[in-house]
Amino acid sequence: LAVATHAHGDHVGGLHEFDHRLVHGCEAHALSEGRDSYSLDLADFSAESQARLAAAGYDISDGLLTAVPHPGYRPAAHVLKGCEPTRVLAEGDVVDLGDRAFEVLHLPGHSPGSIGLWEAATGTLFSGDAIYDGPLLDEIPGADIAAYRATMERLLRLPVQVVHGGHDGSFGAERLAQIARGYLARTG
Ligand SMILES: [Zn+2]
Ligand SMILES: [Zn+2]
């Protein structure tokens, strides 16, 4: 079983290999579409995309790829396979793994169907790209700053112990508050 926190290509490339594929309703269509060419080689990015990453605060001087599957592999030839979700998620749904259960939190802003998986018993949040300890992307296609601000307000009220983000290292409540308050201050 695989849960997509959202349908961006850097998160769902292997989803088609799983029997059970879960995604929020707002991104079910995006998941099924796929892309004929999805390169993570910086050289294949448009000048606009490169500028946006740099402006967000990413050091992209070394590119985005540190390894490829085999010598001669061409990142530009990578196809992002679309796949149909087997279950469409909404706010408040529960993903029950048997020994652990996670509540779906709809956390839009980075993308319309961004979700977090919340285990209240342990204060554990898998946050996807709704929040992580790195430059947040809120001006990419599909992003919405007003929605992102509401998500940050919500996250500030969540009694988290640990956040596992979609990028960068895990962090606790104090760092979450710093990131969320910083975002609200920057965009207010
Ligand atoms: Zn993303
Ligand atoms: Zn991402």
Image (cartoon, rainbow, N blue to C red):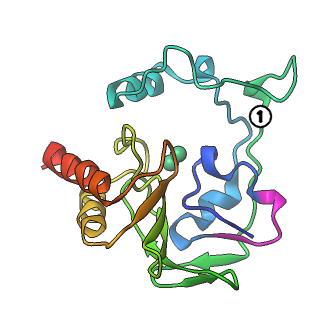
Give the camera-side residue of 116 and 21: 116
- Residue at the image position 60 percent from the left and 58 percent from the top: 30
Where 12 sits versus 40, above or below? Answer: below
Q: Which quarter of the rendered picture does the N terminus lie within?
A: bottom right
Q: Residues within 10 Å of mark 1 (few under 14, many from 20)?
A: some
- Residue at the image position 73 percent from the left and 75 percent from the top: 86
Residue located beneath label 1 in the image? 78
How many marks the image carries: the answer is 1
Residue 12, image x, y percentages: 67, 53
Q: Secondary structure at mark 1?
A: loop
Q: Which residues are magenta?
A: 16-22
Give amino acid for label 1.
His
Q: Quadrant of residue 35?
A: top right
In the picture as drawn, the residue positioned furthest to the top comes out as 61
Residue 107, image x, y percentages: 39, 66
Please state if 66 lies on the left or on the right of 72 as rendered. Answer: left
- Residue at the image position 35 percent from the left and 41 percent from the top: 139
Residue 178, image x, y percentages: 23, 50
Where 5 sits versus 44, above or below? Answer: below
Where 77 sits versus 110, above or below? Answer: above
Q: Is mark 1 within 8 Å of ligand 2?
A: no
Q: Quadrant of residue 87?
A: bottom right
Residue 59, image x, y percentages: 43, 21
Q: Is residue 18 magenta?
A: yes
- Residue at the image position 27 percent from the left and 60 percent from the top: 152
Q: Is residue 20 magenta?
A: yes
Give the camera-side residue of 163 and 117: 163
